[in-house]
């Protein structure tokens, strides 16, 4: 699997909204998969405090 596909799958697995994935991919596409995996959090963990 290509690096960008792996990052996209990771974002989906982490629950990020489909409409925000293209923008996020633009921002993280220059990073390595391992760095992205360490930096991002599951979407629900990020939004939990806001409800």
Image (cartoon, helix red, strand yellow):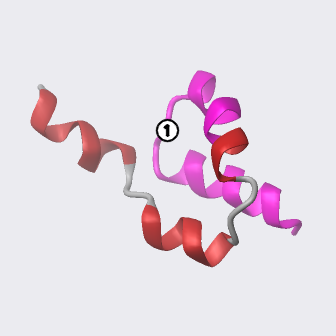
The residue under label 1 is 16
Camera-side residue of 36 and 1: 36
Q: Does 8 sit left or right of 16 as displayed?
A: right
Please, is residue 49 above or below residue 17 in the view?
Answer: below
Q: Does 33 sit left or right of 46 as displayed?
A: right
| Extreme-right residue of the structure | 2
Q: Residue at x 37, y 44 (%)?
A: 43
Please, is residue 4 above or below residue 33 in the view?
Answer: above
Camera-side residue of 51 and 26: 26
Magenta region, residue range = 1-24
Residue 34, image x, y percentages: 61, 77
Q: In which quarter of the image is the C terminus?
A: top left
Chief SS of the magenta region: helix
Residue 11, image x, y percentages: 57, 49
| Residue 22 among those drawn in magenta | yes
Residue 30, image x, y percentages: 75, 58
Mark 1 neighbour density, 10 Å: few (under 14) some (14–19) many (20 or more): some
**Labels in figure, total:** 1
Secondary structure at badge 1 equals loop
Q: In which quarter of the image is the N terminus?
A: bottom right
Residue 45, image x, y percentages: 25, 49
Q: Residue at x 24, y 36 (%)?
A: 47
| Residue 2 among those drawn in magenta | yes
Q: Does 2 sit left or right of 39 as displayed?
A: right
Please, is residue 38 above or below residue 23 in the view?
Answer: below
Q: Which residue is drawn at 46% across and 43% down?
A: 15
């Amino acid at each position: 699997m290509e690096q960008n596909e792996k990052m996209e799958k990771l974002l989906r697995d982490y629950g990020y909204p489909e409409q925000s994935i293209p923008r996020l991919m633009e921002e993280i596409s220059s990073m390595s998969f391992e760095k992205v995996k360490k930096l991002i959090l599951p979407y629900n963990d990020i939004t939990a405090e806001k409800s």
